[in-house]
Image (cartoon, grey):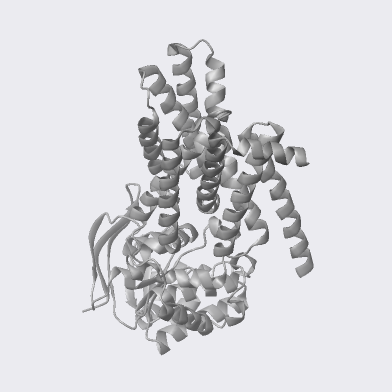
Amino acid sequence: MSESLNQLYTYLQFPFVRYALIVGVLIALCSSLLGVTLVLKRFSFIGDGLSHVAFGAMAVAAVVGLTNDMPLVLIVTTVSAILLLRTGTNAKIKGDAAVAMISVGALAIGYLLMNVFSKSANVSGDVCTTLFGSTSILTLNKTKVWLCVVISVIVVAVFTIFYNKVFALTFDENFAKATGTKAGVYNLIIAIIIAAVIVLAMNLVGSLLISALVIFPALSAMRVFKTFRSVTICSAIVSVICALAGILISIVASTPVGSTIVLVDIIVFFGFFLVGSIKTRGAK
Amino acid sequence: MSLIQCKDLSLGYDGHEIVKNLSFSVNSGDYLCIVGENGSGKTTLMKTVLGLNPLISGEIKFGDGLKKNEIGYLPQQTPVQRDFPASVFEIVLSGFCGGMGINPFYSRQQKAEAVCNIEKMGISNLKNRCYRELSGGQQQRVLLARALCATKKLILLDEPVSGLDSKATAEMYSIVKRLNSEDGITVIMISHDISAAVSYASHILHIGTSCLFCTKEDYIKNQTTVFPEVTGNE
């Protein structure tokens, strides 16, 4: 045990490990705040869908030869998020189907482009890295950490300011619209911050595991808590603790960062599930 | 000037026209019941008046200084709400959302008013309960309390009693009637139940292949001659 702690202490001396911890916790916080709304609006898989879009955009950037693909990815993902969320509950193609369409389409096009035009010899390795984010969290530089801090502060601030609007729109969009809430504007703001968070999160856990960060904390909190406020707060706390624990464990046990965080999330979910069923049985 | 005046409305969605040449007006203090077959366009009419659905042609005018954010609405329940983790108080409070503009938080006065509306619906004991654990009748009262937070003038109800048992239905009707007669709130209600519509409403709007708008008394007189099918199967 003390050996592990020593090892941990040694690793924490490295700036890249500290960067990973900061970024991991911030992303976990942001994605869990938005997760509650997304899960309730039946957009659980939007994280996965948008991350595939981002993957497609990265592929295009790689083929065109852009050295800095961040702006392109950010723009393409934001536009897709807006297209998906803008229509809200009144869309012709419902949330899950629309997300699935965009997700599969972007993934296929991205892989095709990478395969046909890639200059690198190790195509499947490149794809794997983009999807699972196996190393990128450990290659963060100071600029990326600051970018992450700034975006996280903005997301948390926007979420706090619009908390009541988000609740009203999530619970009943038609009522909110009918009684004079400017649903279009708020949906747009929410879509933009969701896109920002997902592009950020791709750096941490990679495309395929983003959905876990969005879904698990929210679902865990919903097992036990009954009000929107308590569910939101609980899911934020759960998400931050899981991310922290996941990163520390992955350092000590030298496991992949993203998968370890998700594993911790899954274990916590079953814990909450048990507590939830004991609570309801106790009430009866 | 009436509260709402609709002239030569043409209603529909996705380019399909369902209702043509519909004219009616609602005055302050009226209790209008909209009746008609399934699919005749009752909900479409309500959504169009609320601005949720584009108007194909015609004109809807709000009078008496009625503003867009002074209308209460009780929609049909959506599937999202069935497993939504929210307390009764949170939901009722969200009724103020449209009225507060860019102000991000609810005031103390709004919170007090929400509590007051919860009391009015006789559900004070459920204030901190979770919405998804309530019965259908209790849920409707919560949504009605929320609608009251949005308005002092006009409330639109889309089949408020669907899915309720007979006791809850009677209670719902008497609550709405009380809001109309005691608080002076104008009511527009969609209903399947013609006998209830006739006994509570002051005006009836029948939507179908031909539309009829008249006072309750005229409707009862006309019912047997113009719409024999209506009395038969309801």
Give coordinates of residue B81: x percent, y percent. Answer: 55, 60
Q: Is residue B164 left or right of residue B223?
A: right
Above or below for B229 versus A157: below
Give me the residue at 48% from left, 68% from top: B159
Q: Is B92 on the left or on the right of A66, as rendered? A: right
The part of the image, by quadrant, that contains residue B32 is bottom left
Q: Nearer the viewer, residue B189 or A271?
A: A271
Q: Quadrant of the C terminus of chain A?
A: bottom right
* Count of residue discs: 0
Foreground: B150 or A18?
Answer: A18
User: Residue at (55%, 46%) from the top-left corner?
Assistant: A25
Any part of residue B168 in sight? yes
Residue B194 can be seen in this image? no
Q: Position of residue A240 (x, y in %)?
A: 59, 50
Q: Nearer the viewer, residue A16 or B14?
A: A16
Quadrant of the frame with the N terminus of chain A: top right
**Which quadrant of the structure image shows residue B228?**
bottom left
Which image quadrant for residue B36?
Answer: bottom left
Q: Position of residue A44 (x, y in %)?
A: 55, 45
- Residue A115 falls left or right of residue A280: left
Rendered position, A211 above or below B22: above
Residue drawn 52% across the image and 44% down it: A27
Residue B19 vs residue A239, the one in the foreground: A239
- Residue B218, how many percent across, how many down? 35, 80
